[in-house]
Image (cartoon, rainbow, N blue to C red):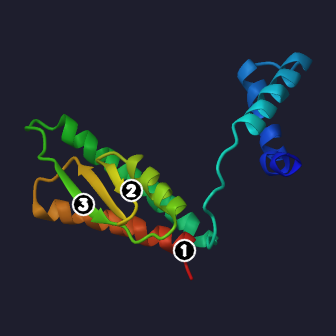
Amino acid sequence: MIAGFKRRFRPFFVVWLTVMWIMLMGEISWANLFGGLAVALGIVLLLPLPAMPISNLSIHWGALVMLILKWFWDLAKASVKVAWLALRPQDPPKTAILNVPMRVQNDLVLSLATVLYNLQPGGAVTDIDIANRMWTVHILDAHSPQAIENEIENVAELERNLIRVFERG
């Protein structure tokens, strides 16, 4: 019982959840502090999260900063591209569904890759085959084989950057 409590109790999360509760309520008061503390303890102790799969991960901070900057640049480019596809005086673009292999080894990094890809307009991961490390991706603009190859290269570049940040040997 005590070992389970030690494993579940995370003081940082209790403090963070309490602060979030107070911010949600909009004012600092004793009632909000104790109410937030009760909610935070209930969440941490009664609804524990599973352990994060972070073994063999190390963060290369310089590469992480470059990944973030590149991601925001790609976000701006993709937003302009999708806006143009929506506003241009032509028929909607031809779309495609592709299977794209992923070489990342860690499930957490695979999840992060999926989130980063899905947050950008123009494509979405519709299925993940974890056993075979394969994404099924829907892309918005598949008007030519070159456009499809460009999207596959975008996925490969995201994958290379994530490997550089998290999975370097």
Q: Is residue 19 visible?
A: no
Per the image, label 3 sits on a secondary structure element best described as strand
Q: Quadrant where the C terminus lies?
A: bottom right
Q: Residues within 10 Å of mark 3 (few under 14, many from 20)?
A: some
Is 15 placed left or right of 56 in the picture?
A: right
Q: Position of residue 145 (x, y in %)?
A: 11, 63
**For residue 74, which numbered disc appears in the image?**
2
Name the amino acid, label 1: Glu
Q: Which of marks 1 and 2 is nearer the N terminus?
A: 2
In the picture shown, does residue 26 fall above or below 57? above
Counting residues from the N terminus, which is met first, the one under dot 3 or under dot 1?
Answer: 3
Along the line of sight, the residue nearer the viewer: 123 or 35: 35
Viewer can see residue 141: yes
Residue 56 drawn at (x, y percent): 62, 73
Residue 99 is marked as: 3
Residue at (20%, 35%) from the top-left corner? 87
- Tell me: residue 106, above or below residue 40: below
Q: In this view, does 96 lie to the left or right of 66?
A: left
Task: Give the side of residue 68 with respect to residue 150, left or right.
Answer: right
Could you classify mark 1 by the number of other residues whose Cα lies within 10 Å: few (under 14), some (14-19), or many (20 or more)? some
Q: Mark 1 points at which residue?
A: 167
Foreground: disc 1 or disc 2: 1
The kind of residue tagged 3 is Asn
C-alpha separation, residue under disc 1 versus residue under disc 2? 22 Å
